């Protein structure tokens, strides 16, 4: 049985969980109330930093679920996403509308898995 690594553990969540060399992350924007382009860039920059620190990178993302509070933001979010994902490395992906996120100023949240 493989060990489960939990990093940045709080009472409610962990910053990252790793099992069988699969990294599980959830990221939210650093700023509240910024436009979707800024928030998407913040989330992707944070994801990339964490993946690299854990021995992975954006080309190794397996699955991403993107939560948006407004589907009208989808095109602008996709512009940032498309420029960020390495060519030929697009993961399986879902994009869903949610009624709201924990911080009412957040427009996006991304949950993903990546190979180490």
Image (cartoon, helix red, strand yellow):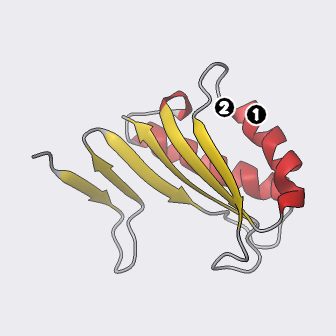
Residue 57 position (above or below residue 98): above
Q: Secondary structure at mark 1?
A: helix
Rendered location of residue 8, percent (x, y): 36, 64
Report the residue marked by disc 1. 82
Residue at (87% x, 46% y) in the render: 75
Nearest the camera: 52 or 27?
27
Left or right: residue 28 compared with residue 35: left
The answer to which image quadrant residue 35 occupies is: bottom right
User: CB under 8 Å between callouts 2 and 1?
Assistant: yes
Q: Residues within 10 Å of mark 1 (few under 14, many from 20)?
A: few
Residue at (76% x, 32% y) in the render: 83
Residue 44 position (above or below residue 105): above
Residue 12 position (above or below residue 37): below
Dividing the image into 4 quarters, which one contains the C terminus? top left
Left or right: residue 57 compared with residue 20: right
Nearest the camera: 1 or 8?
1
Residue at (36% x, 75% y) in the render: 10
Disc marking residue 85? 2
Rendered location of residue 71, percent (x, y): 83, 60
Rendered location of residue 80, percent (x, y): 79, 41
Q: Residues within 10 Å of mark 2 (few under 14, many from 20)?
A: some
Residue at (32% x, 59% y) in the render: 7
Q: Farthest residue in the top direction?
A: 88
Residue 53 position (above or below residue 25): above
């Amino acid at each position: 049985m493989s060990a489960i690594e939990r990093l940045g553990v709080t009472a409610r969540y962990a910053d990252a969980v790793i099992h069988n060399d699969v990294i599980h992350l959830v990221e939210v924007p650093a700023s509240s109330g910024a436009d979707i382009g800024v928030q998407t860039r913040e989330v992707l920059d944070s994801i990339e930093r964490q993946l690299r620190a854990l021995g992975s990178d954006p080309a190794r993302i397996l699955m991403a679920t993107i939560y948006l509070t407004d589907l009208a933001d989808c095109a602008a979010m996709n512009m940032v996403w498309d420029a960020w994902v390495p060519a030929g490395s697009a993961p399986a992906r879902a994009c869903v509308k949610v009624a709201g996120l924990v911080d009412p100023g957040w427009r996006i949240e991304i949950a993903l898995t990546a190979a180490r």
